[in-house]
Image: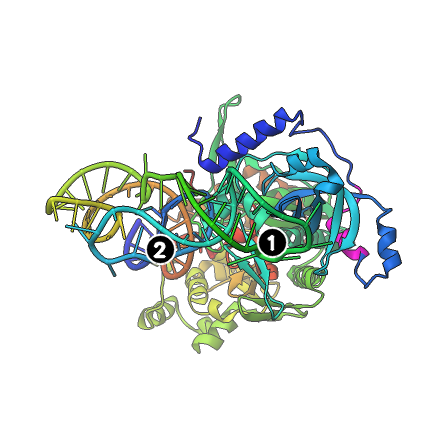
Amino acid sequence: MQELNDLVKARINALEEIKKLGINPYPHRFDVNTDSAAVLAVFKDPQTEEETELQKQNIISVAGRIAAIRKMGKASFIHIKDGTGKIQIYIRQNDVGEDLYKLFKLLDIGDIIGVNGYVFRTKMGEVSIHAVSFVLLTKTIQPLPVVKEEINEAGEKIVHDAFADVELRYRQRYIDLIVNENVKDTFIKRTKIIQSIRRTLEKYGFFEVETPTLQSIYGGANAKPFATHHNALNIPLYLRISNELYLKRLIVGGFNRVYEFVKDFRNEGIDRTHNPEFTQVEWYQAYGDYFDSMDLYEEVVEQACMDIHGTTKVNYQGVEIDFKRPWKRLKMTDAIKEKCGIDVLNMTKADILKYIGDNNIEFDPKLAHSKGLVIAALFEATCEDELVQPAFVMEHPLDTTPLCKPLREYSMQQLEEMKKDPEQVVFVERFEPYVNKWELGNSYTELNDPILQRTLLEQQVERGRGGEEETHPLDEDFINAIEVGMPPTTGVGLGVDRLVMLLTDSATIRDVLLFPLMRPL
RNA sequence: GGGCCGGUAGCUCAGUGGUAGAGCAUCUCCCUUUUAAGGAGAGGGUCGGAGGUUCGAGACCUCCCCGGCUCACCA
């Protein structure tokens, strides 16, 4: 038993008093027939005397958590919060009787009650419920932070003593949701965004599926996995880092348009835009290419923004971002040309490395073995900061991914020759959407050449042995699926959390995750 | 992992080496249209943890725990 502070002791005492009054502090149900939002709408317009009198005949019942109490002897005002907002309740001994008023005096902020009464407007003009009776529905033991609100003369709401400790807010999100108004709103928007994405995909005939979270071979992205173990089978398992390879199996199997919202798990650092588990939606479309995916990606995001805000423009942390289609599209090498003034296509790997060195550009020397990876690294170090408004960066070097098709402009013979020359960089039909300098997703014209697929995945394994940590283990069954034959296909991954951040003006990913990972205490 | 900042009452915060504070909340009393309700009084602390310096530490030093920002890592 933990040591009780005075506030908890006082509430337990009140609970005992209530029981002595013969009242069950935890009854089983209560009939609710309206809510605070609906009540406030009743007196939206000025009322006549007669109409006000009429309301007295209309007894309604609401239920919610006590948010504020103002006791004045034998009459009191409280505010309760229900799912839709806040409403003031007037409780008077003359109306509810001495016994109930005795119970009322034992209530605290945080307790949950049901109220029967009629709507009226107070002297001060606030639409309220005049209680004729009430029922205690849940007596609470733990005190809530006492947050007070004031409307100043300018009509602005001033919040006093807001529950602001971010650590406590994340660890005890239920309290955060109760006392901090805007928190719930963010999560309502999150759900609406997900619903909007789903609607857009359904509109185009995409079919929602579910694929395994526990995988014996992880793949589809370059990331470190979480490892776990299955006892009965006595095998190691991994939490998925991506569902890409499973969705492609479904394309092979004849589902021509599929999508899935998934939690991906990546065993990496935590910061403002990274949580170890995060949500992606991936969709795959047979017979399409990455241009089709760009079109749909734009539409999905623009529509989500419209559904939340009624406009394509949002303010994110002081920067206006406009999701209006069409978005800017630029090749990676052109972005480098624009920013750095160099054309990496006409440079040797040594030249590019020299440029990186001469300009003190951050560079991980482990990547120096591949000209393509050097180019991608140069792009990331120099160009990402420019990509604030929505834009598609396209045509990445082949070495950045083993799952994407080379550009259609290469002839088969050309491709063979390029692969033999380390100074030749093969580019692939890939794009990454960037907004606010963040990668907001990833998309390919999917590789469906089984011979090239095997070669590229085997190279990944070799690179893994060579020290690059985040490369793929070989998934033979996936290659088998591609050998069985996957139609021309394009696929997209969209980072849901970051999109929600942008659309809700949230500064950190933790503000759009109900329960972000915290180190246990 | 590095750098910087923070952890004091249930909540929000003061407190630069000398008796641990304020507001709200809590408890007692008054108050039948209040709204940061008001008035009178009272209680409430392992100052994140452990060592150390000092006559004396919430404060200074060392280590540790938790968090925030930032850099690195993370396509």
Left or right: B73, with A85 as reference point = left
The local secondary structure at tag 2 comes to helix
Where A23 falls versus A335 (above or below)?
Answer: above
Q: Which residue is mark 2?
A: A366
Left or right: A115, with A159 as reference point = right
Q: Tell me the quarter of the picture where residue A432 sits.
A: bottom right
| One can see residue A255 in this view | yes
Q: Earlier in the sequence, mark 1 or mark 2?
A: 1
Magenta residue span: A33-42
Name the image quarter holding the N terminus of chain A. Answer: top left
Q: Chain of mark 1?
A: A
Q: x, y percentage for residue A228?
A: 48, 32
Q: Marks 1 and 2, Cα distance to the nearest angstrom?
A: 48 Å
Where A478 falls versus A431 (above or below)?
Answer: above
Q: Nearest the camera: A445 or A148?
A: A148
Q: Tell me the quarter of the picture where residue A254 sits.
A: top right
Magenta stretch: residue A39 in it?
yes
Q: Nearest the camera: A244 or A121?
A: A121
Q: Chain of mark 2?
A: A
Q: What kind of residue is marked 2?
A: Lys
Q: What kind of residue is marked 1?
A: Glu
Identify the residue shown where x is 44% and y is 50%. Answer: A270
Q: Residues within 10 Å of mark 2 (few under 14, many from 20)?
A: few
Q: x, y percentage for residue A400?
A: 49, 56
Name the image quarter holding the C terminus of chain A. Answer: top left
| One can see residue A448 in this view | no
Q: x, y percentage for residue A114?
A: 72, 39
Left or right: A353, with A507 as reference point = left
Q: x, y percentage for residue A429?
A: 59, 61
Q: Which residue is mark 1?
A: A181
